[in-house]
Image (cartoon, rainbow, N blue to C red):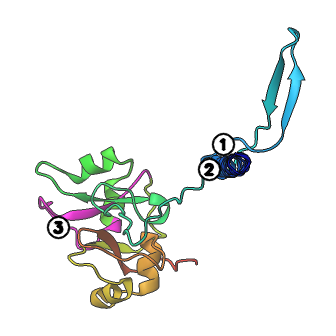
Amino acid sequence: MLVWGIILVVVATIVVWLLFTQGEVFGQFQGAPTGTTESTETSTGIPTTNLSSTRTPILTPIPTLTGIATIRPILGPETPLGIDHKFLIHQIQEGDSLDRIAGQHGTTVAALLAINYRLPSPLVPGWAIVVPINFVDTQEFPVFEVYSVTEDISLADLATRLSVDLGQLKYYNALDDQFVPQAGDWLLVPRFESATPTP
């Protein structure tokens, strides 16, 4: 009988010890409160237990996206481009006239004639022209031709293909070294210099 009593005490002690230690471990992984407890007495005389507010955080990895290409807008007609967005490329529509285009964009017919390389007369629907936006003095700029990119190509290769200086191509289109022309882009191609670009 005495042996059974000793065995029961030992087993009970082990069970209590296991429950106590496992409860602490499971509580920490589940974000349960940890820390010391303080017993305070309310105005009613009933003691309350105050747990510290620290919790062991559960850390969840944040997935990161890699290898996803960024999408940039196509440089197309009617989109301001170039130095300080001073120009746009306009595709001639049926019924367009230089007077009408100039009036819509705050410029003059003389400025349109001065900035465009080989401007057809009369205007041909579908032809793309360069339009100064809200200015008329084009003397500091070269004469521009519009080029529609048909395939993804490096700026250096495109400059070679168009027989234009790479630095001027980048400068007048306000492009950086990382820019890669894509099919569908429209660019300004300087044809005759009237001013030297400043870096």
The residue singled out by tag 2 in the image is 26
Residue for point 84% across, 14% down: 46
Q: Position of residue 117 (x, y in %)?
A: 28, 73
- Neighbour class for label 3 at 10 Å: few (<14), some, many (≥20)? few
Residue at the far front in the pictured view? 1
- Circle 1: residue type: Ala
The residue mark sitting in front, 3 or 1, is 1
Please tell me the numbered disc located at residue 32: 1
Q: Which residues are magenta?
A: 114-134
Q: Measure how far apart labels 3 and 1 are at the Cα level.
A: 79 Å
Q: Which residue is mark 3?
A: 120
Above or below for 130 versus 58: below
Give the mark toward the camera: 2 or 1: 2
Q: Considering only order in the chain, which callout, 3 or 2, is on the residue closer to the N terminus? A: 2
To which quarter of the image does residue 60 belong? bottom right
Is 100 in the magenta? no
